[in-house]
Image (cartoon, rainbow, N blue to C red):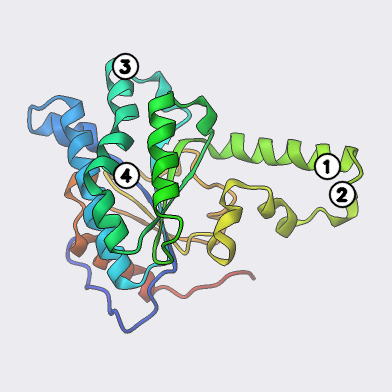
């Protein structure tokens, strides 16, 4: 568990190329302040821009954010509707800054199941930033890792059946090429996972890709997670011995 007293990161040391964040605690942040849950989601949305901008300045190559899981559809209808409008609100508000800071937007997940207005917002954002070559802001939207792996397995099986592949070429590298993060290339697998709000579980997020990632958990709710918080998480990462395999 990350302590608020942890040392700040040394930016002259290795900064993670790919940071993944499970942005948890928006609802509890709002409840603590006697506000509706949607107020927490709005505060969380604003914090996405703060952390994205800072990560970009640090030289992070990919920032993957768990924005909406395949399980989140079970939430109250009013809350889901608000969450589905957040991409429109976010890109409407911050697109000029994202372009100015050379951020490229990507979205992974089962996007064909999103409402048309949500899908349009994310596709427009991808199109408007496709020429940028700085930090990749990778939103996981309507994403579930087990379903992703199942879909990749099905696609591989179909290619074998059609004669495009033989079973002897199926290995970890090939499977990775069929996952939604394949377009991230060398940065497909996160170096560091951060989860806010005190929970210590992966919640079906990037299960394959996180196999060798360092993990940092913090009690802070996502709207309270600051640039100093990110520095402390990176400092924790920098203190660990990175062992990729036995």
Q: Position of residue 196 (x, y in %)?
A: 29, 47
Q: Are marks 2 and 4 in contact (CB under 8 Å)?
A: no
Q: Position of residue 58 (x, y in %)?
A: 30, 72
- In the rendered structure, the answer to whether residue 53 lies left or right of residue 31 reads right
Q: Earlier in the sequence, mark 3 or mark 1?
A: 3
Residue at image location 25% in from the left, 64% down from the top: 54
Quadrant placement of the C terminus: bottom right
Of residues 62 and 121, the one nearer the viewer is: 121
Asked whether the viewer can see residue 80, the reply is yes
Q: Earlier in the sequence, mark 2 or mark 4?
A: 4
Residue at image location 61% in from the left, 54% down from the top: 182
Asked where in the image residue 148 lies, by quadrant, the reply is top right
Residue at image location 54% in from the left, 59% down from the top: 184
Which residue of the protein is positioned furthest toward the bottom in this rendering?
12
In the displayed structure, 96 sits above or below 154; it is below
Q: Earlier in the sequence, mark 1 or mark 2?
A: 1
Q: Position of residue 5 (x, y in %)?
A: 17, 66
In the displayed structure, 75 sits above or below 210; it is above
Q: Are marks 1 and 2 in contact (CB under 8 Å)?
A: yes
Q: Which residue is mark 3?
A: 76
- Mark nearest the camera among 2 and 3 is 2
Q: Which residue is mark 2?
A: 165
Q: Which residue is mark 4?
A: 23
Distance between mark 2 and mark 3 Cα atoms: 44 Å
Q: Residues within 10 Å of mark 3 (few under 14, many from 20)?
A: few
Asked where in the image residue 230 lies, by quadrant, the reply is bottom left
SS at badge 1: helix
Q: Are marks 4 and 3 in contact (CB under 8 Å)?
A: no
Distance between mark 1 and mark 2 Cα atoms: 6 Å
Distance between mark 3 and mark 1 Cα atoms: 39 Å
């Amino acid at each position: 568990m990350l302590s608020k007293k942890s040392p700040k990161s040394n930016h002259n040391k290795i900064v993670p190329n790919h940071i993944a964040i499970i942005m948890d605690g928006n609802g509890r942040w709002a409840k603590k302040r006697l506000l509706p849950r949607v107020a927490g989601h709005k505060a969380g949305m604003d914090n996405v821009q703060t952390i994205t901008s800072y990560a970009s300045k640090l030289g992070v190559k990919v920032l993957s954010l768990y924005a909406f899981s395949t399980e989140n559809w079970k939430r109250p209808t009013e809350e889901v509707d608000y969450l589905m409008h957040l991409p429109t609100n976010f890109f409407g508000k911050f697109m000029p800054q994202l372009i100015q800071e050379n951020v490229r937007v990507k979205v992974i997940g089962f996007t064909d199941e999103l409402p048309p207005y949500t899908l349009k917002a994310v596709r427009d954002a991808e199109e408007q930033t496709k020429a940028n070559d700085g930090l990749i802001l990778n939103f996981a939207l309507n994403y579930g890792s087990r379903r992703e792996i199942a879909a990749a397995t099905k696609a591989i099986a179909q290619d074998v059946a059609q004669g495009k592949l033989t079973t002897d070429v199926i290995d970890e590298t090939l499977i990775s090429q069929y996952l939604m993060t394949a377009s991230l290339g060398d940065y497909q697998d996160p170096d560091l996972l951060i989860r806010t709000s005190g929970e210590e579980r992966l919640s079906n997020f990037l299960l394959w890709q996180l196999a060798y990632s360092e993990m940092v958990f913090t009690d802070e709710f996502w709207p309270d997670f600051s640039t100093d918080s990110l520095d402390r998480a990176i400092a924790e990462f920098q203190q660990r011995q990175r062992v990729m395999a036995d």
